[in-house]
Amino acid sequence: MKRVTIKDIAAHLSLSVSTVSRALADDPYIRRETREKILRAAEDLNYKRNSLAVNLRYGRTGIVGVVVDEMLSSYAGQALRGLQAVMQKEGISILVACSYHDSDQEARNLRAMESAMVDGLIVHPCHDSSNVDIFNRLLAKGVPMVFLGRNPGATKASEVVVDDYSKVFFLLDHVIRSGRSRIVHITGDGRSDYFDTIRHAYADALARFGIAYDPCKVIAAKPTFEGGMSAVDMIRSRGIGFDAVFAAADLQAIGAMNRLLQLGVKIPEEVSVAGYAGSCLSKMVYPQLTTVEPPLVEMGEKSARLLLEKINDPSAPERSMTVDAKILLRSSTHSVSEAGG
């Protein structure tokens, strides 16, 4: 079916294309009777405004790009709910791409967004810092950008983040006070300021209770379910004694817990397990996972507003927003005395 254009409306009413265009744009210098006649004809002919063409006239596409690290957990999904709610009110569409923990795929996604000429980017980056140069190139080019959840490091862009250090520190404070002292930490397998921060909080929490930091108890693994399972196998193959596992990502923690249960380890009676950056998956497993849960919908909303601010005023300063997160103590951790130990 042929798309109805402004030229078709003009021909139908024997008016100039310029008059029809100005009336549809609500030009105050068009007579009210003429504007109403044009609007009635547009409705009768089923005219649909070409938003892309209008936006391009003003140097915009009306589309923002969203690049997320993963879609398996609800992290990105919940953030997208908040983000989309804000953007829809502004008549802006969202183009989403997923990197699946692969920095090469993330780079391809960023280049694709650049080619699509999106008006701005919201990025929940991969856990490593491989694409800092690409982020900085896009920022230098004037592409408005906001980082969601974590900043890949060495970039000057707005961000909406959680105070990861303090949340990890107090989560581990609970684990240690519950009677655990041989805590294995599953970290990421790439270079990342995010993982460094979490590892420092882990080390400082141990030091607070006089527990020596043992690098052998820090296991690098992919931030995935499979990574958590393989981390448990690495721990066992090295003969490391442990009574708790703390993973930097919930998917790792759930994978570790699954593998421990396969091996007949009782959770939490024999080994406590805790994760970080909680999602609804942490409630769907048994036992339910102790974790830290960020306000994801709120983070999506805030990141959208920061991006709109930068799109509408490129000279606006970069801003960092830190939101509070909840430490959720669930049945994957409790005291040795409660377990009868």
Image: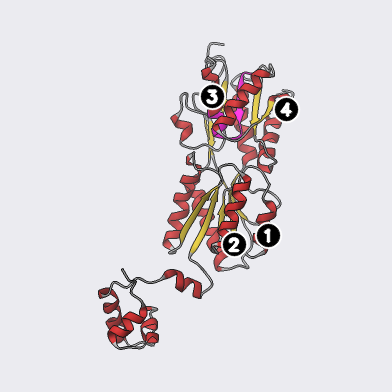
Decide which of tag 3 and tag 4 comes sooner along the chain: 4
Kind of element beneath mark 1: helix
Query: How packed is label 2: few (under 14 Cα within 10 Å), some, or many (20 or more)?
Result: many
Q: Nearer the viewer, mark 1 or mark 4?
A: 1
Residue linked to disc 3: 257
What is the CA distance from the residue labelled 1 to the residue labelled 4?
40 Å
Query: How packed is label 1: few (under 14 Cα within 10 Å), some, or many (20 or more)?
Result: few
Residue 40 screen position, x and y as percent: 26, 78
Q: Nearer the viewer, mark 1 or mark 3?
A: 1
Residue 133 seen in this snapshot: yes
Decide which of tag 3 and tag 2 comes sooner along the chain: 2
Q: Is residue 128 above or below residue 205?
A: below
What is the CA distance from the residue labelled 1 to the residue labelled 2?
12 Å
Q: Nearer the viewer, mark 3 or mark 4?
A: 3
Query: How packed is label 4: few (under 14 Cα within 10 Å), some, or many (20 or more)?
Result: few
Residue 24 screen position, x and y as percent: 36, 78
Identified at 60% across, 26% down, the residue is 230
Q: Which residues are magenta?
A: 242-254
Q: Is residue 108 part of the magenta span, yes or no? A: no
Residue 144, label in figure: 2
Residue 289 screen position, x and y as percent: 51, 28
What is the CA distance from the residue labelled 2 to the residue labelled 4?
41 Å
Residue linked to disc 1: 137
Amino acid type, residue under disc 2 in the picture: Pro
Decide which of tag 1 and tag 4 comes sooner along the chain: 1
Residue 181 seen in this snapshot: no
Residue linked to disc 4: 207
Residue 59 screen position, x and y as percent: 54, 72
